[in-house]
Image: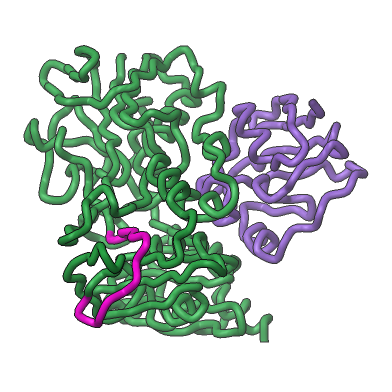
Amino acid sequence: MRLGIVGAGQAACTLIAELIRGDFKGDMLVFNGEPHAPYQRPPLSKNWLKTSNDPTSLRLLPEPLETHPSIQWIQASVQSLSPDRGLLTTDQGTYLVDHLVLATGTTAIKPSIPGLASESIHVVRTLDHAQRLHQSLEGVANITIIGAGFLAFELASSLADPSRTIRILAKGIRALPQVAVKTADRLVDQAPASIRVGIEIERFDETMQTLVTNHGSIPSDLVIAAIGAQPNDALATACGLGSSDGIPVDEFMQTAHPRVSAIGEVSLHHQPHLNRIQRIESISEANDSASVCAKRLLGHPEPFQATPWFWSDQGDAKLQIAGLCDRTDDETCLIEAQTELVMIRHQGQRVTAIEALNSAKEFMAARRLLDQGDLALDDLLQAGSVFAQLQSSRS
Amino acid sequence: MPQLTCINPNEQAIDVSFESGETILQATYRAGVDGILAECGGGCSCATCHVILNANWDGTLEAPSVQEADMLSFAVDPTPYSRLACQVQLTDQHEGLTLAVAKRQY
């Protein structure tokens, strides 16, 4: 079997690794649209931006896998697909495959700001972005980050320096709306940035180097947008396999076309943990969906079952989240100490997520429990739960 | 280059060369050792790079941080010699270290 893999990010590389380790009887054409060997993205906004800036430290595939004889790397963007015929077209030529896996990921969204050219707005999604940002920092005294999610806060921590003032601008009424109010408050308090909420950006004043907003002018020598990403689903949409938000797949990562699968952040599928269809941008989604796809291609299909999890490094603080919740889910505080904070997110009795700040044990225990199935709030709060035991041993 | 020996989950011994300053994860990953997932890429966030050091090794290692110890306490079947490969920095003194990759990472 000849497999065509479009994309060379986390999901594609997990797929490749699992296929090789599973003794896949076939070969792979991997289409990498970026001018770099596969690399890890999460460090780009974290410690890597602050310290290393050495691309080799980001290497995603070990050499024995990257150079495996079953893989042919093609440094080109795929321009079109013809699933019925198994055809992929790049500017270098046309390739014939038996099955296609779309692992095309997402693209950072840039806001449109009158007076500021799109090229002048930084985003951090790719290695090129991060390197460009790093090279643009010299002499910059005022950094403005538009958006107030995890990425914005990670960037603020990584870019913090006595010579710089960093401002985070939130459009909504609060920063970090995806976590509990208490969790967000901790991160806001610790952030080496001033955070402004309810900000509408009107334009950029080039003479003054300021962003003009509904709350006055904000000095901005450098503007970074961290307002989310959109799925790279144009290839799929062009052959009728797209949707308004990603590429729909079943619980085996199969699209509506038998010759096409989709994995990673671009895939849109039923999330058992949430009991609804949702696209998730995270490393766990990339790994878990790739693993499901690999098992199917190896002839041992198992449906997607994983519980999502996340982490974010905010300077010295580590936030780890097991599960995934809605912004409106209830919040109950389990542990509140000097540096530790554990918040339970729930819908009535059903626990949807555990937010653990500097609380690795609780995060790990929560992952274990959520993987075992539904978790009731009372089970966490009452004696007998791992959490209750941990809580009593702390006090 | 100094070497360590890594026993993969299939009980095969693999010699792994390393440079001083690298972590066990960087060295074993480069060598393509099976069974170390390192889902978070070496950020002490996922505990899927669980390795078990040879109990008879008489060299020294820095003790695990609180974060690492806490993560390990909920890894699958932790032992007193368990470490997260991403958190152990190697020096020339670690020549000859033997370690086993945990049978299961989750």
Question: Can the viewer see residue A169 in this picture?
Answer: yes
Image chain in purple: B
The residue furthest bottom is A395
The residue at the point 34 percent across, 19 percent down is A74
Where residue A3 sits: x, y (%)? 30, 20
Where the N terminus of chain A falls, by quadrant? top left
Residue A83 horizontal side relative to residue B26, left or right: left
Where residue A330 sits: x, y (%)? 33, 81
Q: Nearer the viewer, residue B72 or B68?
A: B68
Where residue B103 sits: x, y (%)? 63, 40
Provide the residue span drawn in magenta: A213-227
The residue at the point 70 percent across, 29 percent down is B11
Is residue B23 highlighted in magenta?
Answer: no
The residue at the point 47 percent across, 41 percent down is A40
Residue A127 horizontal side relative to residue B58, left or right: left
Figure quadrant of residue A208: bottom left
For the stretch drawn in magenta, the main secondary structure is strand
Rendered position, A130 above or below A77? below
The residue furthest right is B58
Colour applied to chain A: green
Figure quadrant of residue A347: bottom left
Residue A201 horizontal side relative to residue B95, left or right: left
Question: Can the viewer see residue B13 in this picture?
Answer: no
